[in-house]
Amino acid sequence: MRLVVRHLELRRLHRPLTGTGPAHPSAPDTVGRFSLASELGKPSRPSTRAMPRRRASFARMASPTASGSGGHSLSSVGRCEILPGMSIRSRLRANSAVDIARLNDFERRLLRRLPRNSTARPFTCDGNPVECKWFVVGFNPATSMATPFWEHWKSGHGFLESKWLEDYRAYRRSAGKRTAMSATRSRMEPLLEVVGKGCLVTNLHNIPSPDARRLSSSDRDTSLFEFLLDCIQPEVIVPHGRKAREYFERRGWPGLVVPAPSHFCRMSFLASHQFGEEVVERWEASKAGAAGRTGQRANREARHE
């Protein structure tokens, strides 16, 4: 057998190539390529094991969706048209341009509602708030900082959460606070670690006060919070505290709303972590159910046709 294989290899070396090989070196090609099976009289089949896998498209088409109030949703800002011949790099570049366009539009709208020197705290997140799919909603911030909100914002990137956390801890130390974080924020951290990037921490009212009773009636305005809801359209909302829970009971929301079992300041770190895992499981189950319903609807429409 070794002599036969050696003889066939020599024949291959002296055979002229006819045709061109494939674009990918591992793709099967029977034109101008030596086949041991054909030389031994066996049928030759192109192997699919070495075929390059078709990569999933990284492009996300931005399509306009109906908004809850007046069409403030940013999903229609920027549109990425994916062509069959586009490379992965071109698609990623196009998606990046769409994300930056949506972020810039969000920044312009927020600036009309929140001046550059404002010390209000409408939200915190890691990077682009428009890409956040989760909202954790309380009543109002507890720690009042002298640094304006826009000092922790970078155009084209979003909110600089790491810088904000440094200033937040430094301010609490300088103010003589006993802990580097408030009880609410520290016990919220385990849930945020479970969720990961893509979670926006916000409140019904953006003006800080040591407790809810000290917040004046003039500062109990939810227009900025409504703006965030309409623009970002989160898929999951976690209200904590009685006021936030009652707000969504009255208002309603088309996405998943999972109230925290208690205010975060009264939860243990372990309970916060377990609650985060529970909400993630419910979110994944709701997405799987929605995908199944979409598939069933498509099958029904196909049968009717």
Image (cartoon, grey):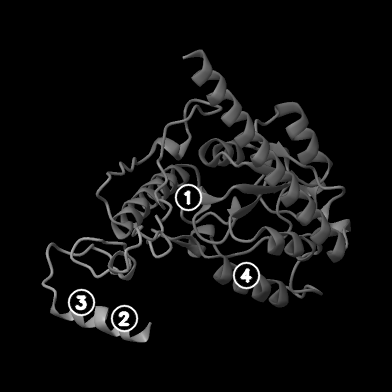
Closer to viewer: mark 2 or mark 4: 2
N-term-proximal mark, 4 vs 1 = 1
Q: Residues within 10 Å of mark 1 (few under 14, many from 20)?
A: few
Q: Position of residue 170 (x, y in %)?
A: 65, 76
Q: Which residue is mark 2?
A: 4
- Per the model, the C-alpha gap separating discs 4 and 1 is 21 Å
In this rendered view, identify the residue nearer to me: 68 or 191: 191
| Residue at the spot 21% in from the left edge and 83% down from the top edge | 10
- Tell me which amino acid carries mark 2: Val
- Per the model, the C-alpha gap separating discs 4 and 3 is 67 Å
- Tell me which amino acid carries mark 1: Pro
The answer to which image quadrant residue 25 occupies is bottom left
Query: Vertically, is 4 above or below 215?
Result: below
- Per the model, the C-alpha gap separating discs 2 and 4 is 73 Å
N-term-proximal mark, 4 vs 3 = 3
Q: Residues within 10 Å of mark 4 (few under 14, many from 20)?
A: some
Q: Position of residue 246 (x, y in %)?
A: 80, 34
Closer to viewer: mark 3 or mark 2: 2
